[in-house]
Image (cartoon, rainbow, N blue to C red):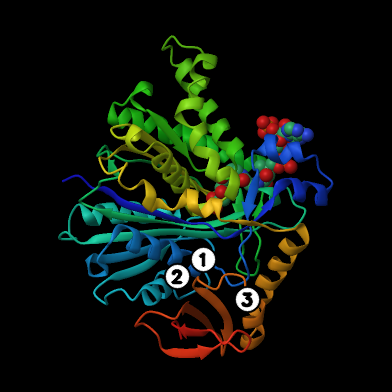
Amino acid sequence: MPVGLEAISVYIPRYYLDTEDLARANGTDPLKYKVGIGVQQFSAPAPHEDSVTMAHEAALALIRNYGVDPDDIGMLIVGSETGVDAAKPIAAYVHGLLGLPSNCRTFDTKHACYSATAALKFARAWCGGASRGRKALVIASDIARYEIGSPGEPTQGAGAVALLVSDQPGLLIFDEFPEAFYTKEVMDFWRPHYRATALVQGELSIESYLTTLESTFLAYCGNSGLKWDDFDCMLFHVPFPKMASKAYKRLCEMEAGDGAGRSVDELLRQFDVRTRPYLTANSRTGNLYSGSLYLSLADLLETEGVRAIGRRVGLFSYGSGCCGEYFSGVVGPEAEACRGKIGLERALADRVALSHHDYLRFRKAAEEMACNDSFYQNLSCRKGHCPSCSAFLGIEDNRRLYCVPNQTETCLRLLQTPRTGRPYIVAAR
Ligand code: HMG
């Protein structure tokens, strides 16, 4: 039975910082960020946004846009490395905010940026066996934050991608070849529990990414019998767009070294067709961590529509620490019909640029909200930023409070916001 993606939806925060403004503030040549790293802008989440609200927004869009019956969702898995609680999963909050049925399995997965791929693989196995026709909702949701002024700062980002996995894979049918993964314990990138920002050994992280790619691609081609020309598109985990070009180049070197008769330069030219067109969204959002590979896939499906149908897409997922996997799928017949439902182009067109000053204010407010038991103060901090979205209201009595504007039967408490008088329903108490 074919299994794959039936639906995909994206949530991108409304605010962004242009890397030119960041470069000016950091005393760096903007070309280093724009060309050297390839990031034009990055998402700067508002203080009321976190991995829960973004996951909820992406999933809500998927359910609404594709007309999914929530009773059909038998599994909800969130892949994230920026969870909000050491014990309670993001998936439990999202399950409550969405009002999904109780006969649904929920949990989070974690292995840095590989987490959503681990979730996808679990969902795929379930949909190919015990699901009895029910569907799995996999959500990748993360906020990437590095220290201010650090080399990682221009590669920050945020957003969520929701993927519906089922035995009706209208968007992407997974190829059923033996799997190709790789693990090696390495300190290339990490974030201890007591830190809000990640630590990284830049060069080591790049080398570890490339070694993992080499190993998994070789294994995948060996296992499947697929050759270089069988891949119409090649998508990668995108911590920053230049990394995807480094990855593609490494594959070209392997292919050229294989004695297949083509030069690296000749193979490199295919980058403009196979990969580059699908890095546009990544270059405007920054690193989505777990969602970055799937953002690239969403970009491909939305950009190409009918032209993508039948094309084989190679996908490389990498998570620091590290674990990686190479897999592939063939774009399904619904690619054209689903174009308007992904929501990526709309989300990018609808954004507002922040000043560098406001970007710093947002960061500070988010840090304060994450550890203060100061509920009402936090409401005013959120005021006016995004009234139509679900929102993290703050922490009260050591519990995180979320609201969804004026809807849903999952409510436990109705709240009048003191400043706006807008009624909110607090869902996760
Ligand atoms: P850096 O060390 O400051 O940058 O930060 P650099 O000096 O290496 O320069 C970067 C590029 O800009 C170079 O190009 C320069 O030549 C060029 P390259 O040689 O690489 O082709 N450059 C310029 N170009 C034009 N005009 C100029 C100019 N100046 C320089 N004036 C670093 C780079 C990657 C270290 C930093 O961004 C960083 O720490 N990023 C975070 C770590 C990361 O993203 N690693 C990637 C692999 S690990 C991964 O993907 C996992 C991850 O997503 C986490 C997870 O799994 O959860 C991060």
Mark toward the start of the polypeptide (1 vs 2):
1
162 or 407: nearer the viewer: 407
Q: Identify which residue is drawn at 45% across, 20% down.
A: 255
Mark toward the start of the polypeptide (3 vs 2):
2
- Tally of marks: 3
Which numbered marker is on residue 51?
1
Local SS, label 1: helix
Left or right: where does residue 411 sit relative to residue 50? left
Local SS, label 2: helix
Residue 56 visible in the displayed image? yes
- Please say if the residues under marks 1 and 2 sit with CB atoms less than 8 Å apart: yes
Mark toward the start of the polypeptide (1 vs 3):
1
Q: Is residue 249 above or below residue 33?
A: above
The residue that label 2 is drawn on is 90
The residue that label 3 is drawn on is 382
Q: Callout 3, which amino acid?
A: Arg
Closer to us: mark 1 or mark 3?
3
Residue 85 visible in the displayed image? no
228 or 184: nearer the viewer: 228
- Please say if the residues under marks 1 and 3 sit with CB atoms less than 8 Å apart: no
Q: How far apart in space, not on screen, are marks 1 and 3 (Cα)?
A: 16 Å
Q: Identify which residue is drawn at 30% across, 46% down.
A: 337
